[in-house]
Amino acid sequence: QGGKWRAEDLTPDHKPELDEERKRIQQSGGEVRKLAGDIPHRVFAKGKMYPGLAMSRSLGDNVAHTVGVSEVPDVVSVQVTEEAKFAIVCSDGVWEFISSQEAVDMVAGFGKAHVQDATDSLCKEAWKRWIDEEGNVVDDITAIVVWLNDA
């Protein structure tokens, strides 16, 4: 601690360009491409321009599931110690422009009594960064913050 809390990522981002993810997608008849002028790699049906998903895991996307996008999450069990103060779970719309450490620093500044304000602030900052970076394009922004131990 010492005035600065350390973020710990518990799962990796599910990006289609990662070897294991790309392999599953290709074995399912999909392909991973990066379009000219686009930032992320995306999942497409072979030779098609859909679904164009910029992640390799997704819930409820029936078209993407036919080309190797999986609904199966990475699951991690960790021992929650006294040092663990809170957990932050967010959609890729938050993590695209906010690092895990930045998110921890933002949330920690609010404290346990103001967890809703902390969550709102995190989402508003993600929205602002999307607008600053992409103009009028904003991805889904979802965040859950759960306090585990008193700070």
Image: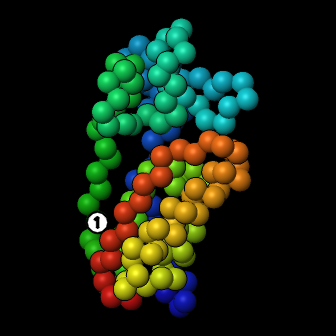
**Vertical side of 88 occupied by 4: above or below:** below
Across and down, in percent, residue 50 comes to: 49, 18
The percent coordinates of residue 132 (x first, y second) are 71, 53
Tell me residue 18's x, y (percent): 51, 36
Q: Is residue 46 left or right of residue 87?
A: right
**Residue 91: image x %, image y %?**
44, 51
Q: Nearer the viewer, residue 117 or 148?
A: 117
Give the answer, above or below, for where 10 lies relative to 32.
Answer: below
Residue drawn at x 40%, y 65% is: 88
Q: Residue at x 57, y 50 (%)?
A: 96
The answer to whether residue 68 is visible is no
Q: Which amino acid type is marked by label 1?
A: Val
Circle 1 crowding by C-alpha within 10 Å: few under 14, some 14–19, many from 20 = few
Residue 75 visible from this viewpoint: yes
Left or right? Give the position of 134 relative to 85: right
In the displayed structure, would residue 45 be above or below residue 35?
Answer: above
Q: Residue furthest top?
A: 47
**Residue bearing mark 1:** 78
Give the image's coloring scheme: rainbow
- Please identify the quarter of the rendering in which residue 106 is found: bottom right
Please state which of residues 114 and 74 is positioned toward the viewer in this rendering.
114
Asked if residue 38 lies left or right of residue 104, the reply is: right
Q: Quadrant of residue 57?
A: top left
